[in-house]
Image (cartoon, rainbow, N blue to C red):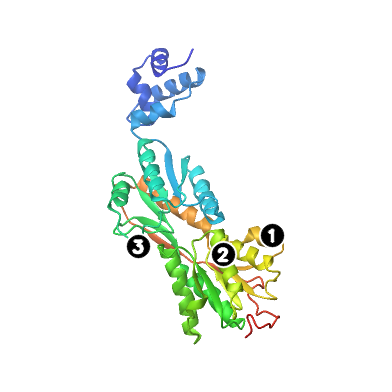
Amino acid sequence: MSVTISHIAKVAGVSKTTVSRVLNENGYVKEETKEKILKVIKELNYTPSAIARSLSTNKTNTIGVIVPDIMNPFFGEVIKGISEEADSHNLNIILFDTDDNIKKELKALKLLREQRIQGIIITPTSVEDEFNSEYLSALESLGIPVVLVEGHVKYSNFSGVFMDNIKGAYQGTEALIKAGHKNIGIITGRMKTQSAKDRFIGYKKALAFHGLNLKEQYVFYGDYRQEGGYKFTKEMLKMEERPTAIFACSNLMTLGCIKAIYEEGLKIPEDIAVIGFDNLDMVNIIGMNISYINGPAREIGVRSMKILIDSLSNKAHKEIKKITLMPKLVLKGSEKYPKAKTKKGAK
C-alpha cells in the first residue's frame, strides 16, 4: 500500500495541513508535533512526490540551463561548473541544447515555464544584433531570475557572467606578433554574437597597436563550428601569399584548422603557426602543443549559479549583477614563426 499524507496525518493524530507544513517547511508547527510527524514519516518510509510538492508550493527545486551547443567543450565546462554549485545547494538541473536555433530556444523556455522551475541560466542564441520582441517577452514573462552566460539580449537588463573577449583576442594576436608574424589570418566566430565581435576587435587592436595594417584578405568570417575552421583554413593555405599564422576564434574552429593543415602535409609551427580561443586540452593531451586563450568556462558556470542562488534567496532585493572574468593566454609553442620559408607564407 502506498503511503499518503492522509495516512501520515491519521497515524500522527494531526491534520493533513500540519503534515503538509512539515513536508514543505512552510508555516508554523510546534517542535513537539513536528518531531512526532517526522518520526511517523520515517517509520512508514514515506518519500514525498516531487510533483505533488511542486503543486502545493507552486515551485520545484529545479533550475533550467539552456546552451546553444552541448557538443562544444566550452559549454561542457560551463555546465560542469553550474552542476557542481547546484549540487551543493540541493538543486536539480533541466538542460536544453538549442543548436543555436531561436525556435528551439523559445520552445525550451515554454517547457521550462510549465515545469515551474525556480530560475534559468542561459546562453542566448544569436539575436544580439536585432530586437526580437517575442524572445524578450518569453524571458521576461517567466517571472523568475534569469542569468545570462556569454551572451546578450538586446534591450534587456538581466544579470550575467561574461568573459573579456577583447582582452583575450588581443593577447593571442599580440603573442603572434611578438613571435615575428606580420601576416596573421583570423577565423572569426558568428558575427551576430557579441563575443565574436569582441574577439575581432581585440585582433584589430593588437595589429594597430603594433603598427600593422588590417589585411582584409586574411579575415574569414566563421561560425564557431569545426567545419568552418576547416573550410577557411583550406582557403588560406591555397593563397599565393598565405598568412604565416592563423588565429582561430573558438576551440572547435581550431580543431578544423588543425585538421586542414595536416591534410595538406604541413606541420605546426614549422610551416604555419596557430593560436586558438578556449581550452584545447583535448588536443594538447596527445602532445600537439597548440597555444590558446583559456576562457574560465567552469568558473563562469560556478559564478552564474552563485548569482542565481543569491537571486532566489533575496527575492525582495533584485540586484542586477554583471561579472566579467579574465581569460588567460597559454603558450605551448605553436605561435612560433615558421622555419620553412617557402613562397607561400614567406616573410
Please name which of the two marks, 1 or 2, marks the residue nearer to the observer: 2
Q: Which residue is mark 3?
A: 129
Would residue 289 be seen by someone viewing this image from the given angle? no
Label 1: element kind = loop
Query: Callout 1: 10 Å neighbours few (<14), some, many (20+)?
Result: few
Residue type of the residue flagged with mark 1: Ile
- Residue 69's disc is none
Secondary structure under tag 3 reads loop
Front-most of residues 66 and 311: 66
User: Hey, which quadrant is residue 35 in on the image?
Assistant: top left
The single residue placed furthest to the bottom in the displayed view is: 211
Could you tell me if residue 249 is visible in this image? yes
Q: Residue at label 1? A: 285
Mark in the foreground, 3 or 1: 3
Check the image and report above or below for 330 versus 68: below
Give the residue displayed 63% in from the left and 65% down from the top: 260
Find residue 19 and report its horizontal and vertical position in percent: 38, 22
Residue depth check, mark 2 versus mark 3: number of the one nearer the observer: 2
Mark 2 → mark 3, Cα distance in angstroms: 25 Å
Q: Earlier in the sequence, mark 3 or mark 1?
A: 3
Residue 284 in picture, x, y percent from top left: 67, 62
Q: What distance separates the C-alpha of mark 1 from that of mark 2?
A: 25 Å
Quadrant occupied by the C terminus: bottom right
Type of residue at label 3?
Asp
The x and y percentages for residue 32 are 40, 23
Viewer-nearest residue: 48 or 345: 345
Image vertical order of residue 118 relative to residue 194, above or below? above
Residue hosting label 2: 231
Specify which label sits upstream in the sequence, 2 or 3.
3
| Residue beneath the point at 65% across and 77% down | 336
Mark-to-mark CA distance, 3 and 1:
37 Å
Nearest to the observer: residue 188 or residue 33: 188
